[in-house]
Image (cartoon, rainbow, N blue to C red):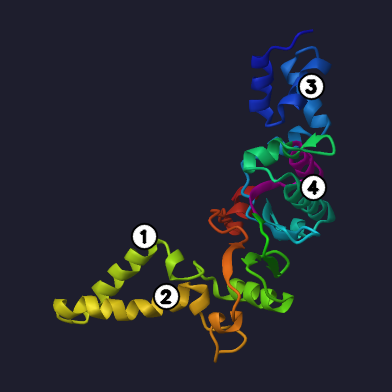
Amino acid sequence: MAISASTVKELRERTGAGMMDCKKALTATDGDMQKAIDWLREKGIAKAAKKSGRVAAEGAVAAYISKDGKTGVLLEVNCETDFTANNENFRALEKKVIEHIAEAKPADLDALNDSVIDGKKVSDLVTEATATIGEKISIRRFVTYETEGKLTTYIHMGGKIGVLVEMTGGSDELGKDVAMQIAAANPSAVDRVGVDASELEHEKEILRKQALEEGKPEKIVEKMVLGRINKFYKEVCLVEQIFVKDNEKTVKDILGKEKVLRFTRWQLGEGIEKKEVDFAAEVAAQAGM
């Protein structure tokens, strides 16, 4: 029988399953909505939908550089628990997706989800992984660098922090040192030119108020702010930071003639609001207390 688009849409909204899976379910059950839901559950597909409201703030940040060294990718894939982040199925999905990104170079997350790996859409692979693993899995973000220079990556604590750096050149050791510096010191820009204007103005305003609170005359406050802002630059600008492996040198000193062109540093789950669980209340509720 013919299955209307509106029926497929309704089933998708009720189960969270993919459009094609919903169409298959309705076709197999002659358009019976409840039977189609059961069909999806039996296939393990609707299992994923039940988890769509959960918070997936664990997982891993992964990095990849192509064999020719010209393409680099940083990818964050989330799940619900750190235990699952070490699951071989989770890691296999992450590896498959990041290598695919390096080759296919999708423009954004939507394009990635619509792209195909081994005959399946990436979004469907994620849905299948959610059903198989038993936790909500989601691809949160990725970035791709292409260069004629040098790419270096660094992953800290199995994926808690990930760094991708593009430099003009230099040794592998230098690249690793710079990537580790970024992971440890968390700069927000390569140099002063790259500092976000709103971030800079915000810091200046704080410093102005600090100076006024100290009772300094307004006529010298601006000079004080300019002097103190240099300390701010040394904290947020990569090339001005003290090198973590040698406090007698700055990052600019260790770079020599090489330059850092850009970098991305991600911390796993940053910005995701994690659900706070009151275990005592949860146990009491289950016990009927």
Tell which circle, 4 or 3, labels the residue nearer the N-terminal end: 3
| Residue kind at label 2, given as amino acid type | Tyr
Image quadrant in which you'd find residue 179? bottom right
Q: Residue furthest top?
A: 1
Q: What range of the chain is rendered magenta? A: 124-144
Q: Which residue is mark 3?
A: 25
Circle 2: is it few (<14), some (14-19), or many (20+) Cα within 10 Å? many
**Residue found 58% across the figure and 55% down from its top:** 277
Tell which circle, 2 or 1, labels the residue nearer the N-terminal end: 1
Q: Is residue 31 above or below residue 66?
A: above
**Cα distance between the residues tagged 4 and 3:** 22 Å
Q: Which residue is mark 2?
A: 233
Q: Quadrant of the N terminus?
A: top right
Residue 187 appears left or right of 134: left
Q: Secondary structure at mark 4?
A: helix
Q: Is residue 192 above or below residue 214?
A: above
Query: In this orientation, does residue 50 appear?
Result: no
| Residue kind at label 3, given as amino acid type | Ala
Q: Which residue is mark 4?
A: 133
Q: Is residue 129 above or below residue 205?
A: above
- In the rendered image, residue 250, in percent from the top left (x then y), is placed at 53, 84
Q: Nearer the viewer, residue 62 or 282?
A: 62
Q: Which residue is mark 1?
A: 198
